[in-house]
Amino acid sequence: MLSSGTRIESTRILNWLGEGSCGQSYHCEGSEGEIKGQEFYVKLIPREVSERKGFQDYFIQEGQALEQLDGPGIWPVLSTGVTKWKHWFRYSWLAGKEIKVEIKQEGEEGETSIEEVRYIRTLEDLCDYAITEISPEQLLTIMITMHQGLYKAHLSGVCHGNLKPSNILVQQNKDGEWESSITEFGLYRLNLFTPYGLSDEEKKEVTVMNIDGRASFLEGEKFRPEDIDHQQLPEENWDLFAFGKVVFGIIEKAKHNSDSLHEWKDWEEWASRATGKEQREPFLSVAHSMDAMPHVGDISRFGIKVESDSSESNVDLEELRLKRELKFQLKEKLSTLKAKRGITALIGGVCFVFYLIYSIYLLLAPAPWTEYSLEGLLDSYQMGAGLFSGQAWGIVPGNYDEEGDGGQDVVGEWSKEDGFFVLKFKRFKKSREEESGKKLWQFIGDGKTSDEDYFIWEDFLQYDRARDALLLIKRKDSRSTYLPGVRENGVPRLFPEGRIKTSFGKIKKSELLFVKEEKSSTRWSLFFALGFILASFMYHRELKKLVLTNGEMVE
């Protein structure tokens, strides 16, 4: 139960009215826009129903159909919507006719009577507080408008399934006659929703009842035919049976307040036929039911006529219901296919864009995070991705290892300068620890060290796209510049630039080629892109085929 003041879309709750088998009822007031200050009746679908998988799409479709239902005998749905978990229907508020009634109470001094104010809003209220106002002629007026509403609803493929006096609103016209309007069309059917694809056993586990609405459900059960499956969707004969039970209830109460019992004989006969009492054949349609009412006259003046072949009318109605079910299932399938098509197209497009960007990147730079090594030696490089700079990884040369071994991993940064990839590395000098007597961690922090505390060197590399390799052009540190060279029958290595010049040709310039270890040319991004794009195309083809096959059912 929601408390007063709670907002439901553009209305706020004034007070709680009750909870029935089809949901909670509230008296609300418009809080904004054109409806501000207006009173409404709002019905919330039970949460246990609204949280079932697929219900929201079904609710929106059914709500749109019920909003179109209007005319004499129908209390129309003004709007529907979803606010968080709350799935609601909004109706006009019926203030009702104020009436004073005497309430008898038992006290210490015996039985006393007090006068209280009541409001007649429903047929149930009219029977409880003013049954003397219902004569056979007045009952005919009430039943005519009820038949008009039910006739239009059935033509639209909507059966009520929960007709009872509390769901029939009454109000007086300008001539003082009571007229009726049926409310809450379609709510019983909504509460029977079960997720598509459940087995018969699983469906039986889903109930339309809740604990608080048990009494309401049992009351409604009195106005439905016996021995029906409560998981079955409501049918036209349920509503016609309910009409008969409503009339029997009115007659029973009216007889206690009338001296003439004979005047109800015709209505008793009609109600017996409507309920199939004494093995009588029930009415086949709303038109047949209305045509048989006492003293109704020519029903064509109400826009209703008895079909010459009622079985054909029933078949048409069943076909309409089936068509709506198929249309809902088709919409669910279309929605699923569109979602799958969109997701696969998006993933395929992202993978393809990544492939294009990566391919363009490889035309200009070495493969990122890929090891390029010198054949026969431990020396290697890796470069992180970047347009003009990024992280770099390398191996510490022996010159910058105070123990003379080298070979440790070192992290640095690369940048692009004059067509070269310049990799800058630095390594802390261990001698600084011995001189200062500090531990290594004590040098961490701004201002704790300077360039003199590090070995700093820069490697200038050039990318050879044809061979997919890196060429070490030179190395620079604070003391000298080193170039690749080779002695006779030796292996290429780095020599100080001045030494090469003074070697009188004994050291010749060479190249140090770092080749990519990963030789696989498989581009998984392209593979995934083509796979997902193909899947999207298949979903699109299936979607197009479904639309062409069911063109008339697709909006």
Image: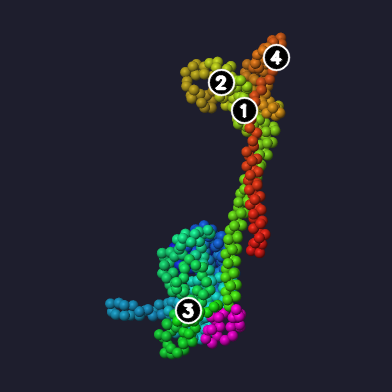
3D distance between C-alphas at marks 1 and 2: 18 Å
Relative to 327, say whether 485 is above or below.
above
In this rendering, does residue 333 appear at all?
A: yes
Q: From this view, report whether residue 47 is shown above or below residue 292.
A: above
Q: Mark 4 falls on what kind of element?
A: strand
**Residue 184 picture location, percent across and down:** 51, 70
Element at badge 1?
Answer: loop
Which label was assigned to residue 517?
1
> Image point 53% across, 84% down: which residue?
293
Q: What residue type is labelled 3?
A: Thr
Label 1 with label 4: CB-CB less than 8 Å: no
* Amino acid type of the residue that numbered disc 1 sits on in the rendered structure: Glu
Structural distance between the alpha carbons of marks 2 and 4: 26 Å
Amino acid at dot 4: Lys
Judging by the rendered image, the residue that carries numbered circle 3 is: 275
| Residue 490 locus on image (x, y percent) | 65, 14
Q: Mark 4 points at which residue?
A: 508
Seen from the viewer's position, the closer of residues 382 and 15 is 382
At x 45%, y 77%, the residue is 125
The boundaries of the magenta stretch are 286-309
Distance from disc 3 to disc 2, alpha carbons, whole Å, reads 98 Å
Q: Mark 3 to mark 4: distance in Å?
A: 114 Å
Sequence order check, earlier mark of 1 and 2: 2
